[in-house]
Amino acid sequence: MPLIAKNKRAFFDYEILEKYEAGLVLEGQEVKSIKTGHISINGSFVTLKSSECWLIGATVPPYKMAGRIGYEPGRSRKLLLHRREIDSLIGQTKQKGLTLVPLEVYTKRGKIKLKFGLARGKKKYEKREIIKKRETDKKIHEAMTMYKA
């Protein structure tokens, strides 16, 4: 599965509880543009409207070779999920503090897929603890490599 785009900030800002995979409803030139690696999911989110899932805020610039006028790069795109998955998401997002965050865009058997997660926002002190842990692990790793040599 070749990875096209990843939302690295989502893993820092949110605690991912569950992951889901969905297909995207795209126009022809969007498919070509995404397969060439031109998509940004930073700052985007998934929402539920009238029993449908939508990706909002993702930017797909127009394909260079397409001659179509009037293309909207930041439009909302429908996600393809099974009904029971949508019903489950509706119930879970009604809980306090849970949201749907896009994580990755990739291809699978020629189709473009979006991996998104059911997430809970992290507090500022949790983020600080992660940074401290990362720094101490780095120092320990450096000290161990010095003693091995």
Image (cartoon, helix red, strand yellow):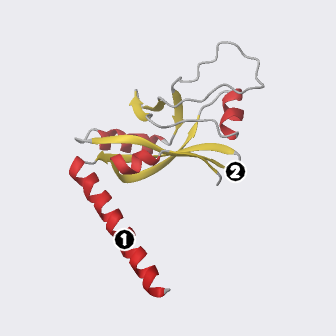
Name the residue located 55 percent from the left edge and 29 percent from the top edge: 59
Check the image and report above or below for 129 versus 113. Answer: below
Check disc 2 and give the amino acid type: Arg
Q: Nearer the viewer, residue 1 or 128?
A: 128
SS of the residue under disc 2: loop
Name which quarter of the figure residue 146 lies in.
bottom left
* Residue 87, percent from left and from top: 38, 40
**Callout 1: 10 Å neighbours few (<14), some, many (20+)?**
few
Q: Residues within 10 Å of mark 2 (few under 14, many from 20)?
A: few
Tags 1 and 2 touching, CB below 8 Å: no
Q: CA distance from mark 1 to mark 2?
A: 42 Å
Q: In terms of sequence position, does the residue under pointer 1 or pointer 2 come before the other?
A: 2
Displayed quadrant of residue 31: top right
Whole-percent x, y for residue 120 in the image: 29, 47
Please name the residue that numbered disc 2 is placed on.
109
Tell me residue 96's x, y (percent). 22, 41
Residue 47 falls left or right of residue 111: left
Q: Is residue 45 above or below residue 118?
A: above
Residue for point 63% across, 36% down: 38
Question: Which labelled disc corresponds to residue 139?
Answer: 1
Which residue is at the far top?
70
